Image (cartoon, rainbow, N blue to C red):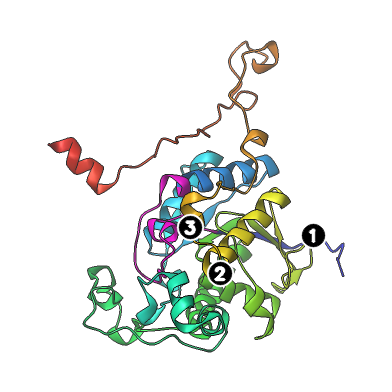
Amino acid sequence: MVSEQEPAYKVIFVRHGQSTWNKANRFIGWTDPNLTKTGELEARVAGQVLLAAGYEFDIIYTSLLKRSIKTAWVVMDELGLHHVPVVTDWRLNERCYGALVGRNKKECVRVYGEDQVKLWRRSFDVRPPPISEDSSLWPGNNRKYDFLERALIPRTESLQDTQARSVDCWDNTIVPTIRSGKRVCVCGHENNLRSLLKHLDGVSDDDIRHVELPRAVPLIYHLDENFKPIRLEGAAPHLNGRYIGDAEEIAAIMARDLANVYDLSVESNLEESDVPHYAAKLDDLLQPCELTDDAFGERGGLDELNCRESDIEETPLFIYKSHEDAARARV
């Protein structure tokens, strides 16, 4: 039932854009691949969707992984909020997929079967096989995590394990910030966000198997004074929050992602060969400004509120350079 109750608080959740390992259809976990150009464009569309809906933030929380950090940067760039702090926290890292990290998801379906892979990916309390501490892909071998006690660096995690750290961050860091009056966005990963939403919405262990979070599609939540969700009209299945964006595009993203993992009749990698889908149709986004009389303020100066040039391009300009680009530039 949809409530007409006025929210005490609002919060936006958004998953990162496409990374190089998303594009390769690999299990990622705490591994740290970069955004692709498609991933940056996905993030820019998410930012423009939020801009069109009138959302602004005072702070954004994200993980220690660059695909989510850079997504946060790009979203804030689209919103013109370059001054807003981006706070990173290891507790918002993606779930550790153990020995599955680096493996192709569809190949795992062929080897282990759809039911087993779904159990590893979507169940609440089942852990994948652990990764060896000798593996270069184990996070404990990354200097980034030298500050963490070794016992806190996982070799594998269930969604329940991920929830323990994500909810700790929510309860002890994010909720006090929201309660103080700040407008908050959480930019994260599919499973750390699924674990948070399970906690917020009280999603059952069975229903959480069916909760999918498409990349770079903002999800708005209204909360009461006790931080309990208020169900919104058009809420996502099994959740009380609502996606912001084009419904057809969002449905196409979710159908693509499921087929790319589980449909063995699909031979190609849909991340590489399929038509890209975003939170909104590109044609519906802000167009470059036209200098008409309405674009000028009372004093004759250009009014940037009425004349905001779109940053969306078919081949987007990155607002950062990769280490490889920087190295080539020095040659």
**SS at badge 2:** helix
Specify whether residue 10 is in view.
Answer: yes
Residue 240 at x, y percent in the picture: 74, 68
Seen at 79% across and 59% down, the residue is 234
Distance of label 1 from label 2 (alpha carbons): 19 Å
Residue 6 at x, y percent in the picture: 81, 60
According to the image, label 3 marks what residue?
268
Quadrant, the C terminus: top left
According to the image, label 2 marks what residue?
193
Q: Amino acid at mark 1?
A: Gly
According to the image, label 1 marks what residue?
234
Distance of label 2 from label 3 (alpha carbons): 28 Å
**SS at badge 3:** loop
Tell which circle, 3 or 1, labels the residue nearer the N-terminal end.
1
Q: Amino acid at mark 3?
A: Ser
Residue 259 at x, y percent in the picture: 58, 64
Residue 35 or 168: which is nearer the viewer?
35
Q: Which residues are magenta?
A: 15-39
Reply above or below: 330 against 108.
Answer: above
Residue 146 or 105: which is nearer the viewer?
105
Question: Residue 32 appears in which quarter of the rendering?
Answer: bottom left
Q: Is residue 59 magenta?
A: no
* Relative horizontal placement of residue 24, taking residue 177 as reference (left or right): left
Seen at 55% across and 51% down, the residue is 58
Tell which circle, 2 or 3, labels the residue nearer the N-terminal end.
2
Q: Amino acid at mark 2?
A: Leu
Question: Residue 136 appears in which quarter of the rendering?
Answer: bottom left
Residue 191 or 57: which is nearer the viewer?
191
Residue 201 at x, y percent in the picture: 70, 76
